[in-house]
Image (cartoon, rainbow, N blue to C red):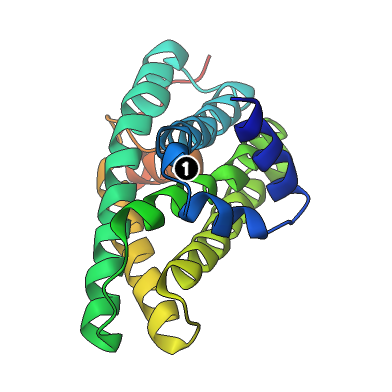
């Protein structure tokens, strides 16, 4: 566990060699999964903090939906992201990725999502949430790149295709009555409520 914290500290210091280290370290598989789940949970928690700071109602129900269920759904969708990226890369560049290595590198690449906790600062919450997700996309791109052993447009397209699948799934989960998407996707629930003529309760 100490090694995991040290690697995370180095990653936050922009030492990207961490992605290569965990990619070839089979013992980092479980820590990588835990980092991914915890980081995605931080995205959900950040969105919930924005919800609470905005004075919106049903905060405990939204906590369960967005943080607990949202983390589960977003993590499953993250796996879909990696699967799509793997399939697209294989299709475009005939590269067969090491699934375990990709999982480990991509798991640690989720760490920037912790920035979403700053969504508690309501005036800049949406920008913070989108910045956290953008940083996640970049670090995941680097993880895919290192797993593929090459850079290039094929890697970029593969990662964006995977992220697109993740984003679409999150959008489908964000409805006026079921706020089961994390982070800034909660704002889509508000939009659905307004455009659908539903009432959003204010405390």
Q: Residue at x 27, y 30 (%)?
A: 178
Q: Is residue 162 left or right of residue 153?
A: left
- Place of residue 190 in the rendered image (x, y in percent of width and height, measured from the top left): 42, 39
Which of the image's four quarters has the N terminus?
top right
Q: State how many labels appear.
A: 1
Q: Position of residue 147 (x, y in %)?
A: 43, 67
Give the class, few, some or many, for how many residues have Cα within 10 Å of label 1's Cα (few <14, many ≥20): many
Residue 53 visible to the viewer: yes
In-image side of 33 versus 202 (left or right): left
Q: In the image, residue 141 lies at what x, y percent?
A: 50, 67
Residue at image location 53% in from the left, 46% down from the top: 108
Judge by depth and name the residue closer to the eye, 54 or 160. 160
Can you identify the residue that label 1 sits on? Answer: 187
The outermost residue toward the right is 13
Q: Quadrant of residue 121?
A: top right
Specify whether residue 197 is in view: no
The quadrant holding residue 54 is top right
Is the residue 93 above or below the residue 88 in the image?
below
Q: Nearer the viewer, residue 177 or 129?
A: 129
Residue 79 pos. (x, y %): 29, 49
What kind of element bears circle 1? Answer: helix
Above-or-below relation of 140 to 197: below
Q: What residue appears at the point 47 percent right and 54 percent down from the top-left corner? A: 24
In the displayed structure, would residue 166 be above or below residue 55?
Answer: below
């Amino acid at each position: 566990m100490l090694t995991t914290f040290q690697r995370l500290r180095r990653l936050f210091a922009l030492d990207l060699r961490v992605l290569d280290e965990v990619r070839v370290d089979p013992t980092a598989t479980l820590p990588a999964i835990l980092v991914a789940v915890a980081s995605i949970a931080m995205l959900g928690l950040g969105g919930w903090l924005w919800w609470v700071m905005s004075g919106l109602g049903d905060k405990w129900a939204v906590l369960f939906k967005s943080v607990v269920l949202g983390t589960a759904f977003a993590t499953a969708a993250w796996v879909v992201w990696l699967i799509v990226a793997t399939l697209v890369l294989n299709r475009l560049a005939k590269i067969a990725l090491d699934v375990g290595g990709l999982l480990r590198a991509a798991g640690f690449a989720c760490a920037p999502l912790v920035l979403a906790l700053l969504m508690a600062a309501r005036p800049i919450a949406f920008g913070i949430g989108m910045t956290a997700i953008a940083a996640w996309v970049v670090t995941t791109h680097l993880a895919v790149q290192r797993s593929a052993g090459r850079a290039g447009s094929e890697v970029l397209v593969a990662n964006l295709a995977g992220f697109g699948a993740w984003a679409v799934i999150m959008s489908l989960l964000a409805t006026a009555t079921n706020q089961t998407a994390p982070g800034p996707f909660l704002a889509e629930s508000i939009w659905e409520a307004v455009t659908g003529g539903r009432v959003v309760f204010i405390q």
